[in-house]
Image: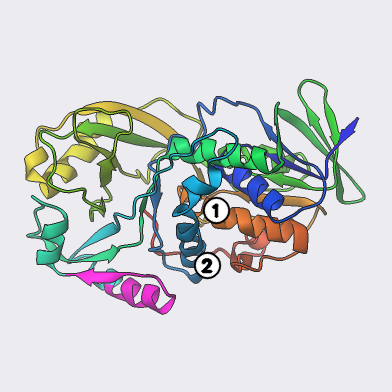
């Protein structure tokens, strides 16, 4: 039987970030990351929109993304290692929430709260919105809330950059499927893989996204995480836009950003998303093209009349890893020593992955998170009935 000091289950953005921070922070011993599919064909982070925003409704989420934004600005330099050139290309184009009559009071209150917590946000009047989003219809809009430091990155490049960086820092990546996690005397003891490999360890970090729940169940620990399909559409604009506009969030829930295509495409494009609250829970990667004409285009054309005839070039689906309060589980599990989890991000994992990686490194090494206090997101909060609400979810 081989051994490792720390085993991370899940080698996507979150697991790779945790591995990188552990190694960079000087953890002693062997760090092994287990990833069952190195193609990452169904990894949530690879299929994501790539948005990064500090506009949340709670201190902890704001601070996680604030710390992450500083990291995103140097990501490509940090992760360009051993011949790998990182091209996450984080762009601070901003997030712009549009407030209509029905949502104006909510956004006024949220704006004040975000400023109190230190978020860099401002109120935009209609003329200022029109300058940032040419051709936008604002007859039903009262004002906008804009975060200039927010933006987006290339999800595929983030994933492979973090993995390359973690490997260069000393983490080992193994292809395999975890079929059992054993404990002894209420302490993690061993991880078993489908090919028969057994790894003795006293520390296991579960960072398997939408597939984290059954891993916790191997030790009798309940992680209330369920997968939920999210659909995205990529569309070519009828003509090249006069400027790169920010991530725009319409009151309908439809939101879009520019697609700065690194593939050299001749057309200008946007990526459009919209969370459907009634989407059934379950592992479903089949895109639903009917949503374009039903849920997406009416709201998009209402806001940008010049896009009435827009048709999608591409559609795909990925999974959100949803929890009952739409916030992640971050930290140590109190019933099994040496078991940690960072999962259930409900659509916000990629944007805060740098800070979560740092926090998990501190929790594993030091027993507590020092850079950002993530205790409100403790995995045991659901058992205690202490759900953590944040009123700024998309």
The picture places residue 363, in percent across and down from the top left corner, at 71, 60
Dividing the picture into quadrants, the one containing residue 180 is top right
Q: Which residue is at 71% across, 46% downward?
A: 205
Q: Is residue 271 left or right of residue 135?
A: right
Instruction: State the residue position of label 2.
Output: 60
Q: Which residues are magenta?
A: 108-124
Instruction: State the residue position of label 1.
Output: 354
Q: Which residue is at 31% across, 44% downward?
A: 274
Dividing the picture into quadrants, the one containing residue 256 is top left
Up the image or down, 333 lies above or below 104; here it is above
SS state under label 1: helix
Depth check: give the residue in front, 323 or 355. Answer: 355
Tag shown at residue 255: none
Query: Spatial distance from mark 2 to mark 1, Cα to Cα?
Result: 14 Å
The picture places residue 119, in percent across and down from the top left corner, at 39, 70
The picture places residue 328, in percent across and down from the top left corner, at 56, 54
Is residue 146 one of those drawn in magenta? no
Up the image or down, 191 lies above or below 97; here it is above
Q: Is residue 346 visible?
A: no
SS state under label 2: helix
Q: Which residue is at 23% across, 53% downward?
A: 250
N-terminal-most mark, 2 or 1: 2
**Image quarter in which the N terminus is found:** top right
The picture places residue 178, in percent across and down from the top left corner, at 73, 31
User: Within 10 angstroms of label 2, few (less than 14), some, or many (20 or more) residues?
Assistant: some
Q: Nearer the viewer, mark 2 or mark 1?
A: 1
User: Within 10 angstroms of label 1, few (less than 14), some, or many (20 or more) residues?
Assistant: many
Up the image or down, 330 lies above or below 313; here it is below
Is residue 121 one of those drawn in magenta? yes
């Amino acid at each position: 039987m081989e051994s490792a000091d720390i085993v991370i289950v899940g080698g996507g953005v979150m697991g790779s970030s945790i591995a990188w921070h552990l190694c960079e922070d000087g953890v002693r011993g062997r760090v092994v990351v287990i990833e069952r599919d190195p193609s990452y064909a169904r990894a949530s982070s690879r299929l994501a929109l790539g948005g990064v925003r500090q506009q949340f409704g709670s201190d902890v989420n704001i601070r996680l993304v604030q710390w992450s934004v500083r990291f995103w600005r140097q990501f490509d330099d940090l992760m360009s290692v051993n011949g790998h050139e990182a091209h996450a290309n984080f762009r601070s184009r901003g997030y712009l929430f549009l407030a209509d009559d029905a949502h104006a009071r909510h956004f006024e209150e949220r704006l004040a709260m975000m400023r109190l917590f230190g978020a860099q946000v401002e109120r935009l009047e209609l003329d200022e919105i029109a300058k940032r989003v040419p051709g936008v219809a604002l007859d039903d809009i009262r004002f906008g809330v804009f975060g200039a430091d927010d933006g987006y990155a290339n999800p595929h490049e983030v994933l492979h950059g973090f993995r390359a960086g973690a490997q260069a820092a000393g983490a080992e990546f193994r292809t395999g499927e975890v079929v059992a996690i054993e404990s002894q005397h209420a302490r993690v003891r061993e991880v078993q893989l489908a090919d028969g490999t057994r790894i003795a360890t006293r520390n296991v970090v579960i960072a398997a996204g939408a597939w984290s729940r059954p891993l916790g169940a191997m030790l009798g620990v309940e992680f209330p995480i369920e997968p939920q399909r999210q659909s995205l559409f990529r569309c070519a604009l009828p003509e090249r836009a006069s400027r790169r506009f920010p991530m725009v969030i319409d009151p309908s829930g439809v939101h879009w950003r520019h697609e700065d295509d690194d593939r050299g495409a001749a057309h200008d494009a946007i990526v459009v998303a919209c969370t459907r609250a009634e989407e059934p829970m379950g592992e479903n990667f089949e895109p639903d093209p009917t949503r374009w004409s039903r849920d997406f285009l009416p709201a998009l054309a209402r806001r940008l009349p010049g896009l009435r005839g827009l048709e999608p070039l591409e559609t795909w689906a990925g999974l959100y890893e949803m929890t009952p309060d739409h916030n992640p589980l971050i930290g140590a599990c109190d019933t099994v020593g040496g078991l940690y989890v960072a999962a259930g991000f409900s659509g916000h994992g990629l944007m805060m992955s740098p800070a979560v990686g740092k926090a998990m490194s501190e929790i594993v090494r030091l027993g507590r998170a020092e850079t950002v206090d993530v205790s409100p997101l403790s995995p045991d909060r659901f058992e205690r009935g202490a759900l953590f609400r944040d009123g700024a979810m998309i």
